[in-house]
Image (cartoon, grey):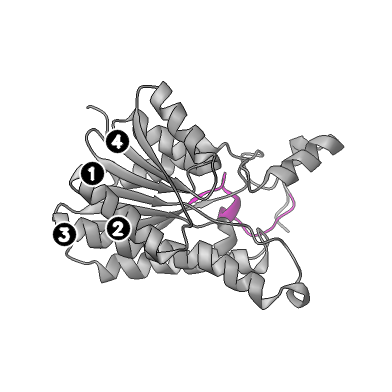
Amino acid sequence: MGPRFEGKSVIVTGAASGIGRAAALGFAAEGAHVLAADWSDAVEDTVAAIAAAGGSASAHKGDAGDEAFVRALADRAAEDHGGLDATFANAGISGGIDRLWDVGVAEWAEVLRINLVGVFLAIRESARVMMAAGRGGAIVATASVAGLRSGAGGLPYSASKAGVINLVATCANQLAGTGIRVNAICPGLTETGMTADMFASARARGSEGKLGQLNPLRRYARPEEAAAVALFLASDEASYVNGQALAVDGGLSSSHPTVPGKFI
């Protein structure tokens, strides 16, 4: 079996770092032309890394929550590559971990704009282009274990990711009969730019070994591990997976809180 994305065009948002960069590199390594999008200039570094490895990619700097930018990105895929085969709507922001009474409306609005409205735009505009080409497609969004239950993120972030989980299920049904699949990944603790401060603080305290200790694998994830699941969902190997949110969390969400080794 050859490369899973040979000759295909793929959009990756949030491609400048973390899971997005790992996914962009993965898609390109398997033959895709990657339209790498991010607000950060570091998206150029992602494209340079892809080129250095012999892959094909283009950099697109813009705001994943901006309707005009997302529409233009999808149109660019259609114009330059004859259509769009897959989109990984990965861009997101953390929004901090303020308590209920300390979170402002402006903070809520910005987190939802990027994390939820941005994913909605990516799904809608990608589906528009995919439907016009008539060859189906796959859309994958980055949700989070924080969207499954409390304890993994701040209020706006967690609510936005819960919204993404519902959004992919709803859109999968809205797109019935089109051949377009919509799914999400729910990463657990992963070392990315978003979690950099947490990791730096733990290393400064000498407690890095405790990061991820609550899941059965007793460790945190590398970006490539979450990206690999996104690539699977975007590939034909997942041709009968639709409307789902897959946890990539070392087993964290498989259990209620327990004391290790004790069940009472």
Q: Is residue 24 left or right of residue 198?
A: left
Residue toward you, 115 or 240: 115
SS at mark 1 in the image: helix
Magenta segment, which residues?
Answer: 247-259
Residue drawn at 27 percent across, 48 percent down: 77
Instruction: First in sequence, mark 4 or 2: give its number.
Output: 4
Q: Is residue 115 left or right of residue 128?
A: right
Residue drawn at 37 percent across, 38 percent down: 58
Could you give the CA–CA distance between mark 3 and mark 1, rounded to whole angstroms? 15 Å
Could you give the CA–CA distance between mark 4 and mark 2, rounded to whole angstroms? 16 Å
| Mark 1 closeness class: few <14, some 14–19, many ≥20 residues within 10 Å | few
Quadrant in which the N terminus is drawn: top left
Read off the residue under disc 3.
132
Q: Residue 51 location in percent, x, y?
A: 39, 26
Read off the residue under disc 4.
32
The disc at residue 80 is: 1
Instruction: First in sequence, mark 4 or 3: give its number.
Output: 4
- Location of residue 64 with respect to 56 vertically, above or below: below
Question: What is the quadrant of residue 68 in the picture?
Answer: bottom left
Instruction: First in sequence, mark 4 or 1: give its number.
Output: 4
Q: Is residue 161 left or right of residue 151?
A: left
The disc at residue 126 is: 2
